[in-house]
């Protein structure tokens, strides 16, 4: 029964990871919490990283022509720095504290977006200082719990990018961040043969999810796309606040 539950949750987690690389970045954040129901969060993060990396390859191919170059120039170096900082401080900062911080950032952004009076309908340009800070936070929180999407959303959503460009930017950024995590993860928790085999079995679900995510992204109206992204961000942020407070 326990094995069956693991396979069910792990398969669904892999599908969510693939969908996140297909253009729905927030759904991938649920993979680690989902698999944490049957194993430790740290073990879940380590196990799922190969699936993130493999799905990244397909995601980059799908969005190879749709991305924001200016955002990637800012966020990619900052994200790698965040991964390095996460590696150096992994034993000092609790996972609960990180989840709480991520959740508060996400909820703050959503509430500000929904209730700010007189909010300009014009797009906000990409600001380097803000982008460096939030890009580093994305890399750091991605390293800790594969939860780098809220800081990215906080920076990019106000720019009102076309949805394909938004999805492509997220996919490429987190592909680089995930690749940067391979060495540090191996250093902190070396992969065993069993770990790799368990990840290998889940690859078809991750690949299926990638194409499913791209299909849904193309067919959701742009206005609804960003509303759904914001709602998803808000719900996941509440979940992270709960986990960070009561873990």
Image (tube, grey):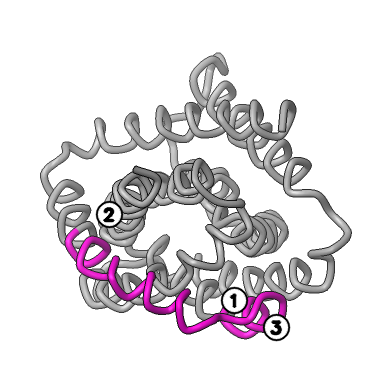
Q: Quadrant of residue 191?
A: bottom right
Q: Give x and y (percent) for residue 35.
A: 46, 48
In space, the residues marked 1 and 3 are separated at their CA atoms by: 10 Å
**Residue at position x 84%, y 63% from top?**
91
In the structure shown, which secondary structural element does the residue marked by tag 1 occupy?
helix
Q: Residues within 10 Å of mark 3 (few under 14, many from 20)?
A: few
**Residue at position x 66%, y 29% from top?**
241
In the structure shown, which secondary structural element does the residue marked by tag 3 occupy?
helix
**Residue at position x 32%, y 32% from top?**
228
Q: Residues within 10 Å of mark 1 (few under 14, many from 20)?
A: many
Residue bounds of the magenta highlight: 181-208
In the structure shown, which secondary structural element does the residue marked by tag 2 occupy?
helix
Q: Give x and y (percent) for residue 168.
A: 33, 64
Q: Main secondary structure of the magenta part?
A: helix
Q: Give x and y (percent) for residue 170.
A: 42, 60
- Quick one: quadrant of the C terminus? top right
Q: Residues within 10 Å of mark 2 (few under 14, many from 20)?
A: many
Q: Are marks 1 and 3 in contact (CB under 8 Å)?
A: no
Which mark identifies residue 187? 3
> Is residue 218 in view?
yes
Label located before the other in sequence (3 or 2): 2
Q: Does residue 166 lie above or below 195 as drawn?
A: above
Name the front one of labels 1 and 2.
2
Which mark identifies residue 15? 2
């Amino acid at each position: 029964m326990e094995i069956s539950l693991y396979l069910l949750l792990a398969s669904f987690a892999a599908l969510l990871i693939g969908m996140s690389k297909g253009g729905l970045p927030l759904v991938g954040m649920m993979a680690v919490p989902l698999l944490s129901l049957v194993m430790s969060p740290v073990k879940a993060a380590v196990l799922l990283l190969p699936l993130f990396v493999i799905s990244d390859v397909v995601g980059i191919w799908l969005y190879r022509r749709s991305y924001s170059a200016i955002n990637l120039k800012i966020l990619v170096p900052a994200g790698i720095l965040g991964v390095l900082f996460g590696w150096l401080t992994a034993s000092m900062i609790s996972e609960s504290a990180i989840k709480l911080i991520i959740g508060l950032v996400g909820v703050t952004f959503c509430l500000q977006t929904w209730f700010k009076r007189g909010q300009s309908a014009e797009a906000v340009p990409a600001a380097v200082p803000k982008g460096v800070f939030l890009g580093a936070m994305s890399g750091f929180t991605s390293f800790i719990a594969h939860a780098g999407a809220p800081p990215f959303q906080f920076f990019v959503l106000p720019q009102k990018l076309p949805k394909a460009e938004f999805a492509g930017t997220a996919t490429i950024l987190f592909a680089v961040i995930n690749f940067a995590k391979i060495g540090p993860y191996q250093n902190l928790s070396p992969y065993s043969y069993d770990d790799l085999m368990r990840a290998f079995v889940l690859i078809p679900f991750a690949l299926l999810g990638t194409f499913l995510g791209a299909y849904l992204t193309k067919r959701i109206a742009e206005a609804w796309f960003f509303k759904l992204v914001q709602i998803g961000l808000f719900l996941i942020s509440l979940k992270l606040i709960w986990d960070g407070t009561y873990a």
